[in-house]
Image (spheres, coloured by chain):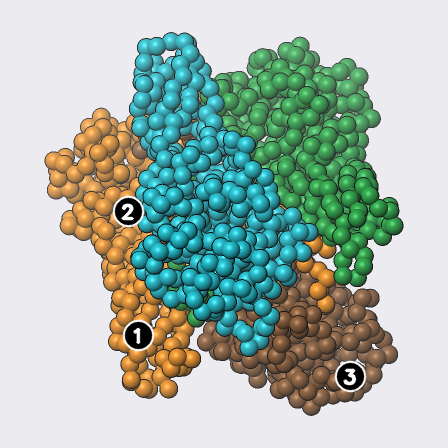
Chain colours: A green, B orange, C cyan, D brown
Amino acid sequence: MNRNFLFFLTISFVILINIKAQVYRKEFYIPDFNGYKTLKCDFHIHTIFSDGYVWPTVRVQEAWMEGLDAIAFTDHIEYRPFKKDVISDHNRAFEIAQELGQRSNLIVIRGTEITRRKPMGHLNAIFTTDNNAMDLKDSIQALSVANQQKAFVFWNHPSNEYGKWSAIQDNLFQKGLFQGIEVVNSNTYYPDAQQWCIDKNLTMMGTSDVHNLITFDYDLSRNGHRTITLVFTKDRSQEGIKEALISRRTAICWNNKIIGREEFLRPIFRNSISVAGIKLMKNGKGIYSGILFIKNISGLSFDLKTSGTYGGLSLPEKIYVPPVSTVAVSFDYQNTFKGVSKIEFPAEVLNFLAGPGKAMHESLLINLNIE
Amino acid sequence: MNRNFLFFLTISFVILINIKAQVYRKEFYIPDFNGYKTLKCDFHIHTIFSDGYVWPTVRVQEAWMEGLDAIAFTDHIEYRPFKKDVISDHNRAFEIAQELGQRSNLIVIRGTEITRRKPMGHLNAIFTTDNNAMDLKDSIQALSVANQQKAFVFWNHPSNEYGKWSAIQDNLFQKGLFQGIEVVNSNTYYPDAQQWCIDKNLTMMGTSDVHNLITFDYDLSRNGHRTITLVFTKDRSQEGIKEALISRRTAICWNNKIIGREEFLRPIFRNSISVAGIKLMKNGKGIYSGILFIKNISGLSFDLKTSGTYGGLSLPEKIYVPPVSTVAVSFDYQNTFKGVSKIEFPAEVLNFLAGPGKAMHESLLINLNIE
Amino acid sequence: MNRNFLFFLTISFVILINIKAQVYRKEFYIPDFNGYKTLKCDFHIHTIFSDGYVWPTVRVQEAWMEGLDAIAFTDHIEYRPFKKDVISDHNRAFEIAQELGQRSNLIVIRGTEITRRKPMGHLNAIFTTDNNAMDLKDSIQALSVANQQKAFVFWNHPSNEYGKWSAIQDNLFQKGLFQGIEVVNSNTYYPDAQQWCIDKNLTMMGTSDVHNLITFDYDLSRNGHRTITLVFTKDRSQEGIKEALISRRTAICWNNKIIGREEFLRPIFRNSISVAGIKLMKNGKGIYSGILFIKNISGLSFDLKTSGTYGGLSLPEKIYVPPVSTVAVSFDYQNTFKGVSKIEFPAEVLNFLAGPGKAMHESLLINLNIE
Amino acid sequence: MNRNFLFFLTISFVILINIKAQVYRKEFYIPDFNGYKTLKCDFHIHTIFSDGYVWPTVRVQEAWMEGLDAIAFTDHIEYRPFKKDVISDHNRAFEIAQELGQRSNLIVIRGTEITRRKPMGHLNAIFTTDNNAMDLKDSIQALSVANQQKAFVFWNHPSNEYGKWSAIQDNLFQKGLFQGIEVVNSNTYYPDAQQWCIDKNLTMMGTSDVHNLITFDYDLSRNGHRTITLVFTKDRSQEGIKEALISRRTAICWNNKIIGREEFLRPIFRNSISVAGIKLMKNGKGIYSGILFIKNISGLSFDLKTSGTYGGLSLPEKIYVPPVSTVAVSFDYQNTFKGVSKIEFPAEVLNFLAGPGKAMHESLLINLNIE
């Protein structure tokens, strides 16, 4: 149509507005690798059966909508501020949630938070068989019972407030009474804890520790999600998750960062990112130039810092790759080489932390076809 | 800068992402008028003390964040599926929420839902003094006690499922045992109920009847909010709200619609919308033409259907005015009149329902200054 | 952590805000099928070389960002309101855009809009070799030249304003001077045109006819995109597209609707939607019930209307499936049959229009495993 | 309604999706003060008449939609890469845009960019009367002509790339040939330039320097907008703007920061933010505690850093206040004082930069009523 007479002003349109929220599961893709399935899990969750503010089924629904694979209920044994109104024993939250979990294909795990003062602090036991059995005065004994139940035990939010690594942790560690540490709890990252996991060969955990609504703690729009532990399992089951936790095959996904062991971070990167091969053409100024397309099939974002120039090829130093998208970056090539060239262009993945403050080093694999 | 060498491709940028959700109160403006304050209220809310899924304080927080002024707790007396786990009496939800309400400057009202089978169905009593006193076998007696407590009583979701107006409602109405009806419950609008309120001089109510999380029922982004009753009060207090309810000074705000009595809808429209005066200029084809600016200072949107041409002036037939914005619409003017002209251009406000399916008729007041 | 003392109020958080827009290609997945690639194309686009408002390269950037595969430049020959300022011939827009297209891996097609008054109206010729050769007084001759250039010619926005099917279209059709019709132009759908394409075996086209910025006509957030023609090609190339257009292998994607021939709509549906098999369990009331998970791997949404009850199975009548998500719907099963059952549950896909106002009939393939 | 049988799963809802983008003006409120009107202006804009990519009217539409009051067209005189296709003189962009500006109530200003190599770099002259008269070889002469035309002249993007303050700037400054400097150009902030403006009493400018589409450079969702100069004028007119620029009454609004002279930043803060008076109550632990409500009526956000504890009152150290919202922060009060107390609680406004890296110091005015 001709619309020269039309700026923005002739017609005004009716907008139809959403009448209801849609309750659905948002699929959020993080690649599998090496035969492992990448499961998204939250192992630290509260309900009204301790100091949380919701009924256990709400936690199943929240997790299902966010695209999670598994959650563990970990109400405090020793701290139940609502007990005047909310009675029942320490297994109740799990028991209530279990059926909806089965129906929803979300793995629901029994657990509990053993809650002591500094210096011991709080520890979660998950895959327990009876939480009531941990309702004991003696901390060591409570942890021992958890381990007798074949639970996986990890230490929560190691910090000045709740206690950092001290003699008692040495003791627990010597006795093998815990197997992992929270490296991220809610929106707090503990770099120390990451180092301890590396040094002592413990499992790195990331949890929401949610008490109120998930949406009060996290902005779920724009690919946002809660703090989760990625668990790299042989199959999608309770047993699969437990085996992987014991084998330390985890990473933490929090605030657009992946925190964990390099051996797991690297294949996630490589199964997410690819660079399209490009045919070089001379631009107006007689320089070989072109556009590099970097494609990201995952729901993660990537913050890359390249070496700028390498092998005659110049790229921007900072490249941000959003989720499920392709970015295009201009480049120049100043070698005299012709034919096909394969360049492994060095880049740091700033949001993949292989150690405390230590970004993972990687390469962009680029095929150049030069006329 | 010169950027001719730059399409979109030279630089890629780092995006900083929200690390946390922000819990805050979103101010959502609906105008006051005629000395009345326009309060936003939800008088039908459930918690774990009947068949809701959250602790009472969550309801205060949800309402505060959405910009509401008042909420009533109306747990069922007769239906408490969680009573095996959640004990305490029928006043408990209110008692728990009250302090946070006071601290948050959100008016928290005691109430209860008297829950009977068809044909009577469910009725809410709010501003009660003791909900336990309504725990009676006899329905009429329960409602009588509510009225003795000086409660305001309204009939919920009149429908085939829960009962429509029948002999029993006639009886309750004759006895003066209820004063209002839900015209909108959650996302369902009952046009019949609107007509009954008009015919029988009852108060029109709109409520969320929320059981699970508010965000499961409503999309709060893009100016979305729950179903609310607008109450036009002499002051912002429990007493102010009660007096206004008894005096039927309400309207319902649901799904971008305002439903209620024309006497309240009209001033809301006029205090929201204004048209900027415009100086007419001849366009290239020798016709007087121009741009009309319609400004909306409220958080509501407006769906206008104009008469197209009136008094020589031609406007688009459909004009949508988003919240807190100005729209620009082109017009032609084909009269020979010169000087200043004041036109009251007829328009229906399609989303202001003064009766069942009956859009409010209004005018756009336009000042033309014609050369 | 214990947070009983904490409602929403103790801590306030710093939000980091985007400092720059991110220019990137949003990948928007529509499935391939039967060996055909599904390409997203817009064959009707204007620039400042006729009555559009942007330089040709902007059109390449807009299309790339939206995830398109191909665009055609179709400036008017006969209508160039900016010719006092913008000179150059009718091939210029294409020539300017071509290099950025190559560099961006976006297929850029030369074309033009032959622009006549009613009853003939406007026709687009794409895959032309020289647009200047169509700058002729005689309409039939101009179209003949386009066809001699092996162009693909389609009739634009058939409507009261620009002309509907009449004697002249009969004549052009007899002579084979056009091969397709716009069934959707910008945000207007012409059901008549869809019927004509079915009756006369013509290619169905959907185009943006963009003059100003794409974002002025379409809301690109929330999976929004412009009106496009889906072209089902043997390969991703100009020739591939042309062969598919001639063979009528197209559908239109507009406003969350897919409009086209059933033979193409059906495999798009089947390659997008799957239903997870489910094991039936009796619920508390002794009825077999469960949750059906419907997964959508495409970027499309689906509006399903089921038959409600079929083969003893009851589903909701309305099911909305958002893009890249899973929805969960409750069901009851009231047969006495046990074992494994495969049900083809009838459903209309309301937003897949196989004819004017004619929703496609499909089935949800459900595997039931009944205890 | 009873919904105990219902988790999220029984009903699935139809979502209505926007069929069209809505073109409208988003009102974005920044307070006026001291009798001055706060106007939002962008004085550095390109079109296809130099190296921009859009027709001049698009710039009016973009600015109108963003809520701006004024824009200046500043195409390069010396750099016109499209001149083979786009002819016409240096006044043309302004002339084309002028009428739509008048009709849209957007102030459109004639200007040009005088574009020289380092060390002089680029300078904008706005409020010119004939841009062609500046098409001169001699730079000083070109600037002299601009000043003879009573233009307001400012120096653009002072940087290593385009030149920083050197002998030539000294010379131009001595001669009074420029009156302002860009402190922010597009998304780059030049702290040096802010200091130079303070030291030499020049006007601080912030501009978009837009070449392509505004949405390519800025994310306009979530209260985003381009880099603008806030101009504090006696009236809303070309003359009003010019007088204010000459009098240095400006600030820059970029990336959620306000950059400028403290005398203007302070009243913007005070007319945006207010703290509701609060009645103190003892909490369960016998400590006076409460909730402080901080209300922001502006479209700006505020990043506050408080002194933590002051006068017995403890507040969070970090408080973020989003646009048009209220935040609630918990506090304790540990004085023995009773009655009414007025506290001026010290806080830095981290995103209000009164000097390079120098956050503005302010107070939150708090009325305490202690029982």
Q: Residue at x 64, y 67 (%)?
A: D52
Q: Nearer the viewer, residue D83 or A275?
A: D83
Amino acid, disc 2: Met
Q: Are marks 2 and 1 in contact (CB under 8 Å)?
A: no
Q: Residue at x 72, y 68 (%)?
A: B1
Q: Are marks 3 and 2 in contact (CB under 8 Å)?
A: no
Q: Determine the image quadrant of residue B156.
A: top left
In front: label 3 or label 2: 3
Amino acid, disc 3: Lys
What chain letter is assigned to the residue under label 1?
B
Q: Residue at x 49, y 32 (%)?
A: C272
Q: Secondary structure at mark 2?
A: strand
User: Can you identify the residue that label 1 sits on?
Assistant: B313
What chain letter is assigned to the residue under label 3?
D
Residue B205, labelled with which disc? 2
Determine if residue B317 is in view: yes
Dots 3 and 1 on the same chain = no
Relative to C321, residue D355 above or below: below
User: Can you identify the residue that label 3 sits on?
Assistant: D137
Q: Quadrant of the N terminus of chain C?
A: top right
A355 displayed left or right of B70: right
Measured from the top left, where is residue A56 in percent x and y? 49, 26
Relative to A125, residue D311 above or below: below
User: Which of pointers 2 and 1 lies earlier in the amino acid sequence?
Assistant: 2
Measured from the top left, where is residue C218 in percent x and y? 48, 54
Q: Nearer the viewer, residue B288 or D168?
A: B288
Q: Residue at x 51, y 42 (%)?
A: C244
